[in-house]
Amino acid sequence: MLKRHWKFWLGFSAALGGILAIAVVALARPSSSPTIRAANAPSVPAASAVGALNRPATAADALPPEAAAIAGALLNGAPSASSDANPGSLTSSKSRRLLSGLGSRGVSLYAIPTSKGAVCTVFSVAYGSAGCFDRFTDEAPVSVDVRDVDQVGGGLPAIVDGLAPSNVKAIEVTVNGQRHSATLANNAFFYELAPSSSWPQTVTITYRNGATRTLSLAAAPTAH
Amino acid sequence: MRLTFAALRKRGGRLLVLACALAVLIPPVTAYAATQFTYASGAYGVGGVYHTTGYNPRQYNQVWHKSGKSWEVWYDTGNNAYCVVYNSSNPTRCGNPISYDARAEAWNLDDNSGVTWTAQTTVP
């Protein structure tokens, strides 16, 4: 029977092989599409993911006075400790400097762990605190903070900053259709927009395995 | 007029007392210059924009919420938006003061966690 229908079986095998080959190529190719998600974002507590918090402290890790004051005021008005909206108490003695010499103001970014395993970030000057982030998840694969501390589009430019787990290789910020590389080191990233720009549109994460994921950012509000 | 050593000592003592009194009195005056209040609170309400009813100078604007859920806060003077902060950290906070009369506003972008969120700012 096989001999009689050899043409059919030859064609069937070729078609099946072709389909399998296309499937293998499609699955192996790193995604460059913003709509395809990288399936590599398990839930990880931020305090354990930020490696700098687990290394010995140096003199540069101590919070400078302005950052200490910002950290000291950060938890004013926090809900009760039992609430899921309470990030825990700050352990400022365990602060670590993640980045320095950032942007036009040359600011530094510090991480402070909390009693609940979250990580709060504080700038040395100008930008205040980006709050506390408790874990990396599929929904929040990095913590993204966008801020313009004066009038939007005037004064100091907006910045994009945040924390990223160690499987992140690069962070890019898209502003008016142009992608810009953010500074990324010690599980933290930072990008300052050009003075003429007002607000970023997306953040693209590139993972060490080559996969990418693009996060849309909320627009800046308009006064009314 | 010629000041003797004793007179200088006496004057210095008075200055020291005055300095100590100011050091004790000034910080509480500064600390209570602004009063924090809650202008909105709730659970869920994705897409909602919440704001104060009045326009005032403010010290900060913040929302306590479930970490990982996105919020945006800003000051609105009626003409411009100031100190716009967008993130999924907790609190989402603009810690910079504004000297203009402005509303404090907060936008719930995707917080469907069910955890109670609280928006706070100050009045003079």
Image: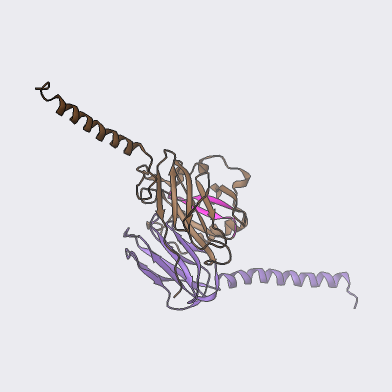
Chain colours: A brown, B purple
Which percent across, then down, holds residue B60? 51, 67
In which quadrant is the N terminus of chain A drawn? Answer: top left
Q: Give the range drawn in magenta.
A: A108-125
Q: Horizontally, is B59 left or right of B119 in the view?
A: right
- At x 39%, y 60%, the residue is B65
- Give the percent coordinates (x, y) of residue B94: 50, 64
Q: Residue placed farthest to the right in the image?
A: B2
User: Is A136 situated above or below B79?
Assistant: above
Q: Does the magenta stretch include residue B62?
A: no
Q: A157 left or right of A49?
A: right
Q: Position of residue B114 (x, y in %)?
A: 31, 60
In the figure, B112 relative to B74: above or below? above
Q: Which residue lies furthest to the top in this view?
A: A3
Query: In the depicted view, which residue is nearer to us: A207 or B123?
Result: A207
Q: Quadrant of the C terminus of chain A?
A: bottom left
Taking the image as shown, residue B21 lies to the left or right of residue A50, namely right
User: Is residue B15 visible to us here?
Assistant: yes
